[in-house]
Image (cartoon, grey):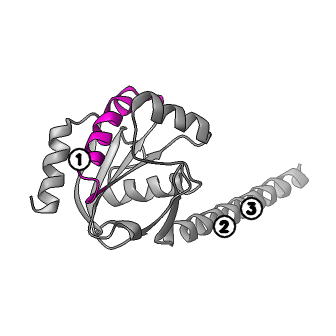
Amino acid sequence: MSKFSFLIPLIAINLLFSACSKDESTTQEANSILSTNDFQLTELDKMQYNVTKSGSGFSVKEAKGKVVIFDIFATWCPPCQAEASHLSSLQEKYKDSLLVLGITIEDNINNEQLQEFRTEYSANYALVNSSENSRFVDAIAKKLKIGSNFGIPLMAMYKDGVLINYYQGAVEEEFIESDIKKALGL
């Protein structure tokens, strides 16, 4: 009986320290990943966008002076499908002063499936299918203080790293355009 009395606390202490060291290293890995402020997002057509997290938001090196809309979506989401043509329309209308980046939240989607989405829903703007998507989406959600279980589509609009507005769920094209015009001083 005394052998078991001695072994149980010893096993419990061993498990406690094993779990703590594992959790601690996992936390350290997560902090080192999230502490970086740079993201490299690769578009379907292989164009790369260099995004930097700043104090107030996110900026895209390749879009200096432009309004940038980060559209966080999924190909299976009906509101995401419906907004694609509206975002395409805005991209075309403001092509010299707007960059729409569609960031899929789907981890296992291949480029062919994303291209099918582009074709079927007239998503004629940059669609990003990058290994950085998940980390970038988490960073945006954290910056917007909306938690990790947010609704999609989620659009965050920035100009030169400053947040203009963000929208969750379906939004009328006119509201988005109104914010674009304000950001551009029109």
Q: Which amino acid does label 1 sit on?
A: Lys
Location of residue 40 with respect to 89 vertically, above or below: below
In this view of the protein, which residue sits in the foreground, 138 or 130? Answer: 130
Residue 129, horizontal then vertical, whole percent: 54, 48
Q: Which amino acid does label 3 sit on?
A: Ser
Residue shown at 16%/52% (left/top)?
179
Highlighted magenta segment, given as a residue range: 75-98
Question: Disc 3 or 2, which lies upstream in sequence?
Answer: 3
Residue for badge 2? 25
Location of residue 183 with respect to 113 vertically, above or below: below
In this view of the protein, which residue sits in the foreground, 99 or 107? Answer: 99
Name the residue at the left extreme.
186
Residue for badge 1? 93
- State which quadrant residue 25 falls in: bottom right
Local secondary structure at mark 2 = helix
Question: Disc 1 or 3, which lies upstream in sequence?
Answer: 3
Question: Disc 2 or 1, which lies upstream in sequence?
Answer: 2
Residue shown at 40%/30% (left/top)?
121
Q: Which of marks 1 and 3 is in front?
A: 1
Residue shown at 29%/46% (left/top)?
92
Residue for badge 3? 18
Residue 161, horizontal then vertical, whole percent: 30, 68
Magenta stretch holds residue 79: yes
Q: Which amino acid does label 2 sit on?
A: Ser
